[in-house]
Amino acid sequence: IMEYLDERFPHPPLMPVDPVSRAQVRLALFRVEKDWYTMAEQCQDATDKKQTNQARKVLKESLLSSAEVFSAKRFFLSDEFSLADASVAALLWRLPLFGIELSGSGAAPIRKYMDTIFARRSFQESLTEVELEMRQ
C-alpha cells in the first residue's frame, strides 16, 4: 500500500529514484516488517506474561543490535527520508506501548534518530490523538 501511495502521489518521493537504492529500501522494509513488526505484534498480542516478556526482549535486542544502522546515514539507510523511515518511525513511536525503553550508550544512535524523526512537522501532523497520548 505504501509503495502504491508513493507512486500515486510522487511528490515528494518516498522511494529512491535509482533502482539499486529502491531495492535496498524494499529489502529494509521487508526486514523491518519480518523482524521488528512481528515481535511488536507478539508484544501486543501475547496471551501470557512470559510470551510478552520474551517478545519484548527479542525486539529490544534486535533494535539495539542494529544501532549502527541508525547512525550510518542521516535517515534509515539513506540520506533522504523514505518509506523505510515511515515504517521504522511508526514502530519506534509505539515502543512505550510495548513496554520497551531504549536506554544506555548503545541506544544513543537510535534515540538520536527518534528525536530527528519525531520532530519532523510531517510526522507530528500524522499522529492521531491516541498516538499522541502514547508518549505523554
Image (cartoon, grey):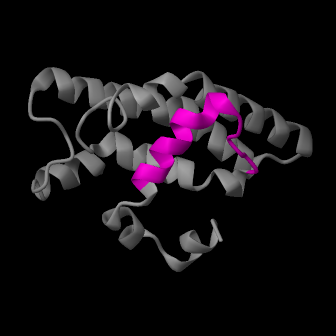
Q: Position of residue 103 (x, y in %)?
A: 70, 39
Residue 59 position by quadrant: top right
Which range of residues does the magenta coloring cover?
99-117
Identified at 24% across, 35% down, the residue is: 79
Q: Position of residue 78 (x, y in %)?
A: 27, 32
21 to the left or right of 123: left
42 to the left or right of 72: right
Nearer-the-camera pick, 100 or 10? 100
Most common secondary structure along the magenta stretch: helix
Q: Residue furthest front?
A: 105
Identified at 79% across, 46% down, the residue is: 46
Q: Is residue 127 above or below residue 54?
A: below
- Give the quadrant of the C terminus: bottom right
Q: Is residue 110 magenta?
A: yes
Identified at 63% across, 65% down, the residue is: 135
Q: Position of residue 125 (x, y in %)?
A: 37, 72
Residue 82 position by quadrant: top left
92 to the left or right of 39: left
Q: Position of residue 92 (x, y in %)?
A: 55, 48
Nearer-the-camera pick, 38 or 16? 16
Identified at 53% across, 38% down, the residue is: 110
Residue 102 position by quadrant: top right
